[in-house]
Image: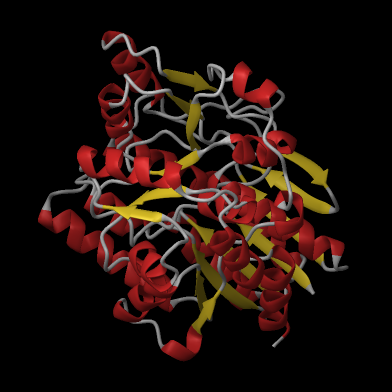
């Protein structure tokens, strides 16, 4: 098959959507399919473009058998509703000429991971004009997340945004997404059940099996001796509400616990300033580690934090959870009980500690319970092997594309 992927985020981004899109495209290429990707230079989660990439230039490269077109992108220094919209719109504008050129290649399948929806109408049109099929793959309901965070709190803007979202979703042959609750949202937004594909995020479970903790790595992150390592690893942005991690660290500063926040993003400086102002010696920060160190990092943690604000959990399913489960980590998840994460914890009672979002006392209690749990967490490991193993998930999706 000729598979064209059109999406804002791609490898070598280490977290979030770019990680999964990159692994998907490379897997398809390995199976013998012709794969092309139209994307932007890597910028996430640090929100700036690092050399050798440039934010203002086109670039063509081949990565593990995938032909990758990099398009110019506006990356804002200060993230507001307006700058984020311009950021998304810039990708749609600069990817347009590259998309049009693919009409001569005539892809069989066009996959559009979102965000961003601004590039979606053209992706669907290219598929139709090429005689191929189109799939809108929803990793985030960006409109729901934006409205849930109050980024577009004017009623008329919200109504227009939801109308545009419905129009885009109806223009694709199929809509895929990563959880049952997100499938239900697609139905609520007018997508017929027969046009929905379940395509969950995955983990290469073999990479995370039987991985041992590293005292050397723990020490390099600031963990003192046998102190418990409480880890947050991933994007540091608005939707996480990570200020409560600093609050929890302050409440637990008398105990032998070290909080380590690994990652980059728009909210990092604020967290560093907050921890510094409170003189918290039990909070440490690190940039994202190389991908090959991720299994050891996750295995070295005694407790993993999966933090989100209220109202975001059902719109965004944290990608970090797949690898935490695969390594057998004990995690604390902040989400309402009726969300996808809440229902997951209800169905598999020992898979994680579920606590109410934006409740620091509940978070502290959840951390204490997680630290008393057996390690590795066999419920999490078994769930990962049976439900989110990368080979199983991608093979199933390949069959959907062949059909």
Image quarter for residue 55? top right
Total label count? Answer: 0
Residue 354 location in percent, x, y? 34, 55
Q: Is residue 40 above or below residue 261?
A: below
Q: Is 39 situated left or right of 351 in this image?
A: right
Residue 65 location in percent, x, y? 85, 53
Q: Is 395 situated left or right of 376 in this image?
A: right
Residue at (43%, 39%) from the top-left corner?
Answer: 87
Image quarter for residue 271? top left
Name the quadrant of the C terminus: bottom right
Residue at (38%, 53%) from the top-left corner?
Answer: 353
Q: In this view, does 72 lie above or below 400?
A: above
Q: Is 82 situated left or right of 115 in this image?
A: left
Image quarter for residue 14? top right
Residue 167 location in percent, x, y? 36, 72
Residue at (48%, 26%) from the top-left corner?
Answer: 260
Residue at (25%, 48%) from the top-left corner?
Answer: 357
Q: Nearer the viewer, residue 261 or 127?
A: 261
């Amino acid at each position: 098959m000729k598979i064209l992927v059109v999406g804002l985020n791609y490898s070598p981004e280490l977290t979030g959507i770019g990680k999964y899109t990159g692994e998907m495209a490379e897997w398809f290429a390995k199976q013998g399919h012709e794969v092309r990707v139209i994307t932007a230079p890597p910028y996430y989660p640090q929100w700036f473009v690092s050399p050798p990439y440039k934010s203002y230039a086109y670039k063509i490269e081949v990565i593990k058998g995938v032909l990758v077109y990099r398009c110019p992108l506006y990356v804002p220094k200060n993230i507001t509703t307006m700058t984020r919209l311009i950021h998304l719109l810039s990708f749609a504008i600069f990817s347009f000429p590259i998309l049009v050129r693919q009409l001569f290649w005539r892809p069989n399948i066009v996959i559009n991971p979102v965000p961003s929806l601004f590039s979606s109408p053209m992706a669907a049109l290219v598929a139709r004009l090429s005689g191929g099929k189109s799939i809108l793959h929803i990793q985030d309901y960006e409109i729901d997340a934006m409205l849930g965070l109050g980024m577009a709190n004017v009623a008329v803007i919200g109504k227009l945004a939801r109308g545009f979202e419905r129009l885009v979703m109806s223009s694709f042959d199929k809509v895929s997404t990563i959880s049952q609750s997100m499938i239900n949202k697609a139905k609520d937004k007018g997508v017929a059940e027969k046009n929905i594909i379940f395509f969950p995020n995955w983990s290469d479970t073999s990479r995370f099996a039987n991985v041992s903790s590293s005292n050397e790595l723990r020490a390099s992150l600031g963990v003192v001796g046998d102190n418990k390592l409480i880890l947050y690893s991933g994007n540091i942005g608005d939707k996480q509400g990570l200020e409560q991690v600093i609050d929890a660290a302050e409440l637990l500063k008398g105990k032998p616990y070290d909080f380590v926040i690994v990652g980059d993003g728009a909210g990092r400086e604020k967290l560093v300033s907050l921890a510094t102002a409170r003189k918290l010696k039990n909070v440490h920060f690190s940039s994202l580690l190389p991908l090959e160190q991720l299994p050891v990092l996750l295995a070295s943690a005694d407790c993993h934090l999966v933090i989100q604000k209220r109202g975001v959990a059902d719109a965004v399913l944290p990608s970090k959870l797949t690898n935490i489960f695969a390594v057998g980590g004990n995690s604390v998840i902040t989400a309402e009980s009726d969300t996808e994460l809440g229902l997951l914890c209800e169905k598999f009672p020992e898979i994680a500690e579920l606590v109410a979002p934006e409740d620091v006392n509940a978070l502290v209690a959840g951390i204490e319970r997680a630290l008393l749990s057996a390690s590795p967490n066999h419920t999490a490991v078994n769930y990962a092997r049976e439900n989110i193993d990368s080979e199983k998930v991608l093979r199933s999706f390949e069959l959907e594309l062949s059909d």
